[in-house]
Image: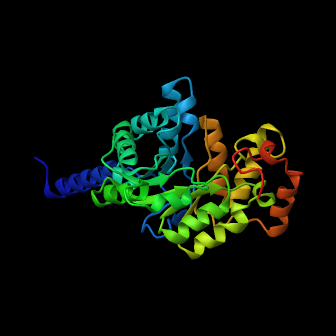
Amino acid sequence: MIDRRTFLGATAAGAASLLLRQSSRPAPLIREISLGATGRSVPRLGLGCFPLGNLPKEDDGIAVVRHALRHGMRYFDTAPSYNGGESERRVGAAIAGSVRAELFITTKTLERRADGARRELEASLRRLGVEYVDCVQVHEVHDDWESLFSKDLVLDGLARARSEKLVRHIGITCHRDPRYVRSACERYEFATALVPVNPADPQHLSFVRDFLPFATEKRIAVVAMKIFGGGRLVTDKLLTARECLQYAWAQKNATVLVPGAASIAELDDALAVAREDKSFDAAWLAAVEAKVGVHRGKDTEWYKNSKP
């Protein structure tokens, strides 16, 4: 017969074990940050999921996302346009079984009509295997920005989806010119803005200089993309991946960084910078910017407009 003390001890141990099993979130390794006006707090390092859809083996893409989850990452940025939805499918397979409320899943739409955006969102939800996404971003806004606001166009459709709880927040992305995204954000309360942040940016149509401080004033969460200049800063050996990551991390007005990672090794490089959580002064930032050399238009930043 088990005495009362042994029974209580076993019960307490069992309860502790249950609590450990129910807590899916690992000990925090990355600094958390408030995500603008969303009311959410997330680790400052997220994952850009574009490369995952292009990997030859599905399991390799899934492994990258699961590695991110194991190391405390919870912000995942994908899109239906990433290899015909393959990135979304792989993210969905990887997050299956996770505590949904702990994740911040974002996708995008290139559609400009409300009905098209709704169909694209519904397809994204199926591929991701979720009932809602935390944010849908109106993707690749350029000189078409004024057309977003009319009745039955994209923002109208996404607002209806938000009222139906298919999406929690609405964001925007812009690659070409910071003036487009600034103008759009003056007209509409976007929750997030996904924009380029890298050492080449300040030389030409700079989002770092001309949009990030503005976004902070508006309480728009800035999500930093194109951290490696679309890859060219590293492939052209102008900078190391670590320098690019450190530069983006040093931007105080960048809320979350979403570097792309095609392998666990590349993700580990980003995790190392996030864990170090170093500050860098203006002289260091200027020295890294100087390493880029003379800006060569689209040879340096292929995603921006050629002229101011």
Residue 181 visible (yes or no): yes
Given residues 302 and 111, the one toward you in this image is 111
Q: Is residue 261 left or right of residue 297?
A: left
* Residue 5 x/y as whole percent: 19, 58
Q: How is the image coloured?
A: rainbow
* Residue 130 x/y as whole percent: 33, 44
Given residues 34 and 131, the one toward you in this image is 131
Given residues 149 and 248, the one toward you in this image is 149
Q: Farthest residue to the left: give it.
A: 1
The quarter in which the C terminus is drawn is bottom right
Residue 29 visible (yes or no): no
Q: Quadrant of residue 213?
A: bottom right
* Residue 51 x/y as whole percent: 58, 36
Q: Residue at x 36, y 39 (%)?
A: 123
Q: Is residue 44 left or right of residue 280?
A: left
Q: How many marks?
A: 0
